[in-house]
Amino acid sequence: MASSHDDHDHDHDAEPVTDRVHDTSWSANLEHPEHADDRELVVRQALAAIEHTAPGNHVNLVTHAAHGHPEDYLYPVLERETDAGIEWEYVDQCGCGGHVLRVHVPA
């Protein structure tokens, strides 16, 4: 029998959101089918996207519609897990139902 960790750990199936530090503002696409199935993957990759954004830039986190508004699950994580000075703002809901959250990394 598989453990619950194995049942919910899709990182081995999911492509990394990025493999480099972005020295310009960019968007992280968290709307793939594997994101719809795994809110924890969305959260982990959102945090990874922020970590891979150079100071003085922002990353647009484009989240999957399946999880609803990011204020319900992503804002609390950002408050708890990001460095002081990180700021975010809700941009809009996409036509496909997903949401865009802009995260600013201070210089």
Image (cartoon, rainbow, N blue to C red):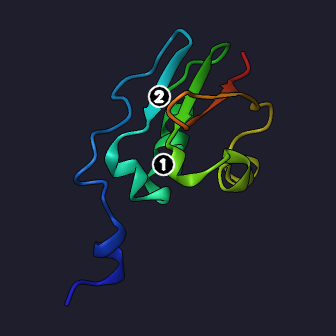
**Residue in the picture at 55% in, 27% down:** 95
Query: Looking at the image, which is closer to me, 86 or 93?
Result: 93
Q: Tell me the residue that label 1 is attached to.
A: 42
Query: Looking at the image, which is closer to me, 27 or 33?
Result: 33
- As drawn, 26 above or below 64: above
Alpha carbon distance from label 2 to label 1: 10 Å
Q: Secondary structure at mark 2?
A: strand
- As drawn, 8 above or below 27: below
Residue 44, x across and y down, in percent: 49, 50
Quadrant in the rendering for residue 58: top right
**Residue in the picture at 33% in, 28% down:** 19
Q: Give the side of residue 48 with respect to residue 89, left or right.
A: left
The amino acid type, in three-letter code, at marker 2 is Ala
**Residue in the picture at 55% in, 42% down:** 47
Quadrant in the rendering for residue 17: top left
Q: Secondary structure at mark 1?
A: helix
Mark 2: few, some, or many residues within 10 Å (few <14, many ≥20)? some
In this view of the protein, can residue 51 be seen by the observer?
no
Q: How many marks?
A: 2
Residue 76, x across and y down, in percent: 74, 54
- As drawn, 70 above or below 8: above
The amino acid type, in three-letter code, at marker 1 is Val
Residue lying farthest to the left in this orientation: 1
Mark 1: few, some, or many residues within 10 Å (few <14, many ≥20)? many
Rendered-image quadrant of the C terminus: top right
Residue 28, x across and y down, in percent: 47, 28
Query: Looking at the image, which is closer to me, 98 or 76?
Result: 98
Residue 49, x across and y down, in percent: 50, 33
Q: Tell me the residue that label 2 is attached to.
A: 28
